[in-house]
Amino acid sequence: MGRLTTHVLDAAHGCPGRDIVVDLYRVDGDRLEHVASRTTNDDGRCDSPLLEGDAYRSGVYQLQFRAGDYYRARGVALTEPAFLDVVVLRFGVDAGQDHYHVPLLISPYSYSTYRGS
C-alpha cells in the first residue's frame, strides 16, 4: 500500500522544524477537502503518514505548513503580515507509486521543496 509523508527542515536555524502544524487537502476543482492534520515531531517529521491505505489514491493534493506560527513560537520577529505565514504546496499523486515524500525547507523569507524518496 502507498503512503504520503513529509518533513520540515528549518534553514534559518539549521534544525528540524519541530511542532509545525501540517494540513493536507484533496483538491476537487475549486474545492478543498480536508484529509488530515499532523504536527511535526522533534525530527521535523510527522509520526504517521498523511495518506495511506484506502485514502491513498490518485489526485491533486495541497499541503499547508503553518510556518509563521512556528517562527513566532520561536521568538522570531516577523513582519505583519508575515511574508510567509502559511506555505502552500499543490502537487499530484499517482497512486500507482508506492511512496510520495514531500519535504519542505523553510526560512522566514523563503522555502523550497522537491519530491523526496
Image (cartoon, helix red, strand yellow):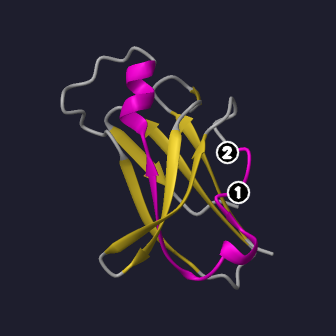
Left or right of 13 in this view: 99: right
Q: Amino acid at mark 2?
A: Cys
What residue do we see at 20% from left, 25% from top?
A: 79
Q: Which residue is mark 2?
A: 46
Left or right of 61 in this view: 52: right
Q: Is residue 105 above or below residue 91?
A: above
The outermost residue toward the left is 80
The residue closer to the viewer here, 40 or 33, is 33
Left or right of 40 in this view: 2: right
What residue do we see at 73% from left, 51% from top?
A: 48
**Mark 2 residue crowding within 10 angstroms, few (<14) / some (14–19) / many (20+):** many
Locate residue 107, reporting x and y percent.
41, 33
- Where disc 2 sits, the SS reads loop
Locate residue 81, reporting x and y percent.
19, 33
What residue do we see at 49% from left, 52% from top?
A: 23
- Where disc 1 sits, the SS reads loop
**Mark 1 residue crowding within 10 angstroms, few (<14) / some (14–19) / many (20+):** some
Magenta region, residue range: 47-73
Q: Amino acid at mark 1?
A: Pro
